[in-house]
Image (cartoon, rainbow, N blue to C red):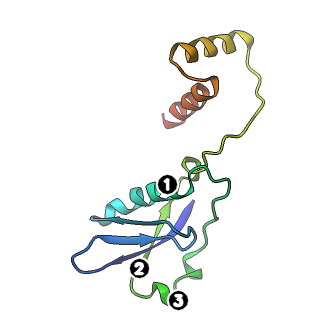
Amino acid sequence: MLYPLYVWKDSNSAYGASFPDLPGVFTAADELNDLPAKAQEAAETMYQGEAHIPEASSIEKWKDAADYADGYWMLVDIDRSKINTKPVRLNISLPESLLRDIDAYAKSHQMTRSGFLAQAALKAMAQ
């Protein structure tokens, strides 16, 4: 989801940045290109395990606010799936033999069934 990120830079300092839609999320980076990754990391840290993450608004909502007069705006894509780590119980159906194989694999790798399935899903989606 694209969030407006307010960016400023004082002389002899790193770029500072904050999200008006995500109160308390601040970050900094020496290079402007590093801000999106640093912003994701800051959002993950602030909202880890939270059930509710505020929705993104448009830059137009904030562009004329006096608090944001000395910098400029970036839109940063925040992957909310990496932030909301609250477990959700679900009911799925799998063939019995596959479930046995999953459980055996997970146990042999000191994992839970849920942990293995989550890791397998993330790996599959990354490809």
Q: Is mark 2 on a helix, strand or loop?
A: strand
**Considering only order in the chain, which callout, 1 or 3, is on the residue closer to the N terminus?**
1
Q: Is mark 1 on a helix, strand or loop?
A: helix
Query: In this image, 21 relative to 6: left or right?
Result: right
The 10 Å Cα crowd at callout 1, few under 14, some 14 to 19, many 20 or more, is few
Q: Which residue lies furthest to the left in this view?
A: 12
In the displayed structure image, the side of residue 46 where residue 90 appears, left or right = right
Q: Residue at x 75, y 34 (%)?
A: 90
Mark 2, other Cα within 10 Å: few <14 / some 14–19 / many ≥20: some
Question: For the residue marked with disc 1, what is the amino acid?
Answer: Thr
Q: Callout 3: helix, strand or loop?
A: loop
**Residue 64, labelled with which disc?**
3
Q: Position of residue 17 (x, y in %)?
A: 41, 71
Q: Residue 72 carries which label?
A: 2
For mark 3, does the 10 Å Cα neighbourhood hold few (<14), some (14 to 19), or many (20 or more) residues?
few
* Tag of residue 91: none
Q: Is residue 115 above or below residue 39?
A: above
54 relative to 65, above or below: above
**Image point 47% across, 63% down: which residue?**
76
Vertical relation: 109 (above or below) 69: above
Q: Position of residue 60 (x, y in %)?
A: 57, 81
Q: Name the residue under label 1.
A: 45
Q: In 3D space, how far apart are the residues under numbered discs 2 and 3 (Cα atoms)?
A: 11 Å
Distance between the Cα atoms at labels 3 and 1? 29 Å
Quadrant of the frame with the N terminus: bottom right
* Residue contact at pointers 2 and 1, CB within 8 angstroms: no
* Position in image of residue 66 (x %, y %): 50, 90
Q: What type is the residue that disc 2 sits on? A: Tyr
Nearest the eye: 115 or 120: 115
* First in residue order: circle 2 vs circle 3: 3
Vertical side of 84 occupied by 119: above or below? above
